Image (cartoon, grey):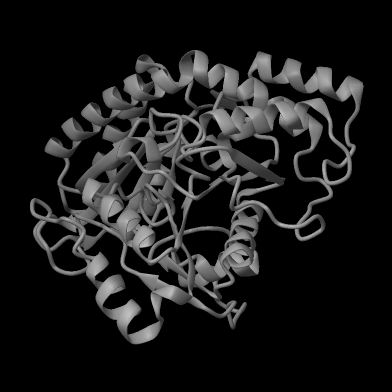
């Protein structure tokens, strides 16, 4: 719950864009921050070791979905984690090119922005992007980019990558990495079928391409598992992590197989990355996630999904409900048959929910995203459902859809 300066209280289902994984100022996280702040605030892990960063590296090596020994680089944000992954992939392979996906969001610094293909406004005025990036369609079974039906969609979108990009645009032996979100975030909270990740991983292995899995939004318990990759049995070469890892303090992590992250001293660094206070917050966050919050995300997320699907049965504005754990997307349409995007209606639903005391955000062109703190209870989820029921109903009536 959050309260504004006028005393209005809101149920937060946005969590600072999926950042406040343990809620707002969890006592255990605050205590860890205060204790570390009393000891020292900064020493730069680029030049000296300190215990909090070493402990966090050990924790990440134990939990990240990478086979074998793991090394981690610490930055300050998700976009920095992705930038490090780009540099590492090119450095290790000696290859210049990268593949990403339409609808993806990987950050706003130039390299990460060149991978990002979510909204034109995010790129407008900043061109040209960094060269050497190719984009393939992402698996969106509700709106299949290659015309398959939802009930039969089985990753045919990857034909475009394999039969066109790799045949007509770039030889796969010149591709350093494929960068993919296991569940697409800004693109609309899209949950791909198992076949998508199975085939993508096999394709990368066949051509010696590193698989970079962007878990910035989907990781750290958000989907009811520590990482969304675990739902698919996906084993990455490099994983990027941020957002919920430190409960609101700035921290980005690029984790990789140790044999890949073998760059020379000075090849890459960060003055503030892995700040000891942020590391202390992350260690406390991971402890809370392991103890109960990953499981809570799975249980309460399933409850919330069930409730949203019940709302879909009553509201024609809802075209699709999808998600895992507490990473849930609700796609709004003006017509379920044509799937015409309800873009302005989506924005009005967000406003109507706000007026009723619920904080939610958009994703993609016409989807609502529900990404609450992982401390959400079933009772609070029911409150969110009640408010959404009213908000969607109000918009349907004003649009003549009720």
Q: Is residue 397 visible?
A: no
How many numbered badges does the structure rendering display?
0
Front position in the image: 295 or 11: 295
Q: Quadrant of residue 32?
A: top right
Residue found at x 67% / y 53%: 262
Query: At which x and y percent is residue 328?
Result: 34, 39
Q: Is 155 situated left or right of 135 in this image?
A: left
Front position in the image: 376 or 112: 112
Q: Is residue 243 visible?
A: yes
Measured along the vertical axis of the image, is residue 340 above or below residue 32?
A: below
Q: Is 187 situated left or right of 162 in this image?
A: right
Query: At which x and y percent is residue 7?
Result: 61, 25
Residue found at x 79% / y 37%: 275
Q: Quadrant of residue 308?
A: top left
Front position in the image: 98 or 402: 98
Front position in the image: 3 or 52: 52
Query: At which x and y percent is residue 90?
Result: 59, 67
Query: At which x and y percent is residue 376?
Result: 44, 21
């Amino acid at each position: 719950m959050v309260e504004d300066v006028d005393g209005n209280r809101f149920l937060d289902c946005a969590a600072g864009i999926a950042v406040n994984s343990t809620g707002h100022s969890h006592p255990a996280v605050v205590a860890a921050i205060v204790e570390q702040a009393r000891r020292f605030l900064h020493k730069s892990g680029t030049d000296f070791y300190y215990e909090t960063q070493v402990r966090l590296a050990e924790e990440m090596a134990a939990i990240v979905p990478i086979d074998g020994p793991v090394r981690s680089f610490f930055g300050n944000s998700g976009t920095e984690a992705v930038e490090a992954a780009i540099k590492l992939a090119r450095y290790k392979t000696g290859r210049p090119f990268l593949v990403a996906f339409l609808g993806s969001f990987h950050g706003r610094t130039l390299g990460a922005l060149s991978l990002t293909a979510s909204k034109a406004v995010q790129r407008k005025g900043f061109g040209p992007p960094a060269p050497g990036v190719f984009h393939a369609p992402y698996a969106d079974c509700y709106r299949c980019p290659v015309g398959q039906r939802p009930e039969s969609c089985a990753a045919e979108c990857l034909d475009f990558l394999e039969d066109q990009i790799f045949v007509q645009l770039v030889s796969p032996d010149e591709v350093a990495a494929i960068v993919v979100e296991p569940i697409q975030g800004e693109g609309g909270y899209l949950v791909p079928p198992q076949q998508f990740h199975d085939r993508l991983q096999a394709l990368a292995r066949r051509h010696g391409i590193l698989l970079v899995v962007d878990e910035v939004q989907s990781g750290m318990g958000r989907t009811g598992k520590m990482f969304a990759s675990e739902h698919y049995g996906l084993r990455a070469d490099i994983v990027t992590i941020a957002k919920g890892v430190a409960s609101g303090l700035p921290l980005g992590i690029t984790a990789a197989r140790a044999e890949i992250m073998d760059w020379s001293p000075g090849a890459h660094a960060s003055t503030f990355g892995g700040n000891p206070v942020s590391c202390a917050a992350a260690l406390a966050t991971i402890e809370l996630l392991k103890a109960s919050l990953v499981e809570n995300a799975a249980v309460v997320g399933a409850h919330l999904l069930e409730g949203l699907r019940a709302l879909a049965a009553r509201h024609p504005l809802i075209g699709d409900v999808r998600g895992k754990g507490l990473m849930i997307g609700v796609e709004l349409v003006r017509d379920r048959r044509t799937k015409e995007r309800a873009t302005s209606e989506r924005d009005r639903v967000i406003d109507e929910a706000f007026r009723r005391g619920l904080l939610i955000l958009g994703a993609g062109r016409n989807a609502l995203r529900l990404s609450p703190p992982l401390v959400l209870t079933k009772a609070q989820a029911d409150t969110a459902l009640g408010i959404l029921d009213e908000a969607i109903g109000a918009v349907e009536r004003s649009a003549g859809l009720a």
